[in-house]
Image: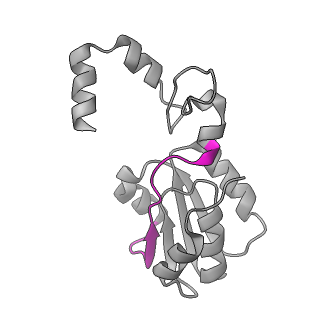
Amino acid sequence: MHQPVLLKEVISHLNLKEGDIVLDATVGGGGHAAEILKRIGPDGRLLGLDADESAIRRTEDKLKNLSGSVSLIKGNFRDLDMLLSKTGIKSLDAALFDVGISSYQLEDASRGFSMKYNARLDMRMNTSLDLTAYDIVNNFKESQLSDIIKTY
């Protein structure tokens, strides 16, 4: 079962108040989002963002019985300016960026993130993209792989 990382500490440091507008830029399993929504109340607004469609669906399910304004968007936080402008949000009171991989992604063999399973190397956060880690490892030139390793 997925547990949100450092939930109490994160919520404490966000210093949330009733009516706040909050961004959860990597909504993941929705654990942080649920607690944020409880703190900002029905007059607050939560914008949840994730590149992983399954994370958006899990969060929709987790938040369905909580009150408050929620907008969940499939997207990458690198496009945050554009995504915020689409929602009409001009400013935020708090933002959370819990970057990295989730236990959901590690435990789903089809995602190809874990060596625990004998599965095809995929490693896409956004599964609608065509290029997989398998494609990169097996089709890129050595110089391209070297550049990727040096850069990232």
What residue is rendered at 43% in x and 48% in y?
A: 76
What's the magenta region? 88-104
Among the 4 quarters of the image, the one containing residue 141? top left
What residue is rendered at 59% in x and 81% in y?
A: 40
Outermost bottom residue: 18
Among the 4 quarters of the image, the one containing residue 88? bottom left
The question of residue 94 being in magenta is answered with: yes
Q: Please provide percent x and percent y for residue 87.
A: 48, 63
Can residue 131 be spotted in the picture?
no
79 relative to 103 in the view: left or right: left
Please name whichever residue, 38 or 110, is drawn nearer the observer in this view of the structure: 110
| Residue 52 vertical position relative to residue 138 in the rendered view, above or below | below
What residue is rendered at 39% in x and 18% in y?
A: 137
Q: Main secondary structure of the magenta part?
A: loop
The question of residue 25 being in magenta is answered with: no
143 relative to 123 in the view: left or right: left
Can residue 1 be spotted in the picture?
yes
Q: Please provide percent x and percent y for residue 80.
A: 38, 57
Q: Quadrant of the C terminus?
A: top left
Please name whichever residue, 67 or 101, is drawn nearer the observer in this view of the structure: 101
What residue is rendered at 64% in x and 45% in y?
A: 104
Outermost front residue: 116
